[in-house]
Amino acid sequence: MKGWIKASLLVIAGVILGVPLMSMGYYTMVRTSTPQFCALCHEIQPAYHDWKTSSHGFNEQGVVADCMDCHLPAPHNTFNFFYKKAYHGIKDVVAHIFLEKYDRAENRERAYHDIENDQCMKCHRNLLYLPDKRGAMLAHRTVIYPREGFVKRCTDCHRHLVHFPKSQYAYAKEH
């Protein structure tokens, strides 16, 4: 009987400690996953302002792709998502504190290399059905179904969509 009481007390203690820890972890993840949080570092502020005027931050459909949508893997692979989020966060904090110079062009190129096609395909799933844009359909087919040895990235063609200065919003109406 004593073993049952001890086990019950351990379960209750685990719940009492576990629920607040999980809640704090979730709260932290939500709060640190916004573009506004990313822009707290002065190095990221230009990228944040460029994003706000891009089609990923402002468009006719009202769909917004946040920093995490492009720079982190899909959250359905929970371990990989949290690992990458922690890695990027720690890397950015270390760079913010210890680097004297932040090379925006170099970091942009590194980001283009790190963004996988799957990250783009989270939102852009219907690329093979563009009836009024046959050339785009064929170009996307070579990315989605590449021949052996001819791997292409979405960022090979779509480099200037988000993080480049614009004097006005990139608001394109459908024709």
Image (cartoon, rainbow, N blue to C red):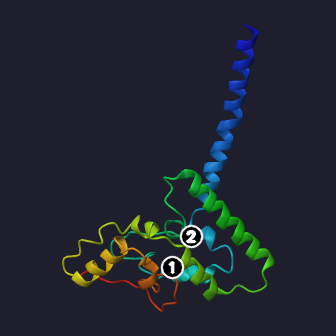
Q: Say which quarter of the image contains residue 45.
A: bottom right
Q: Secondary structure at mark 2?
A: helix
User: Which quarter of the rendering shows the C terminus?
Assistant: bottom left
**Front residue (pair 114, 3):** 114
| Mark 2: amino acid | Pro
Badge 1, how many Cα within 10 Å: few under 14, some, many 20+? many
Q: Is residue 141 above or below residue 9?
A: below
**Residue found at the far top of this picture:** 1
Expressed as whole percent of the image width and height from the top left, the position of residue 35 reads 56, 70
Tell me where residue 34 appears, x and y as whole percent.
57, 65
Of 40 and 86, which appears nearest the observer? 86
Sequence-first disc among 1 and 2: 2
Q: At label 1, which amino acid type do we have?
A: Trp
Position above or below: 149 against 83: below
In this view, the residue in front, 5 or 106, is 106
- Drawn side of residue 104 relative to residue 73, left or right: right
Residue sitting at 48 percent across and 90 percent down?
166
Q: Position of residue 77 (x, y in %)?
A: 51, 53
Which residue in the structure is indicated by mark 2? 35
SS class of the residue under badge 1? helix
Q: Are marks 1 and 2 in contact (CB under 8 Å)?
A: yes
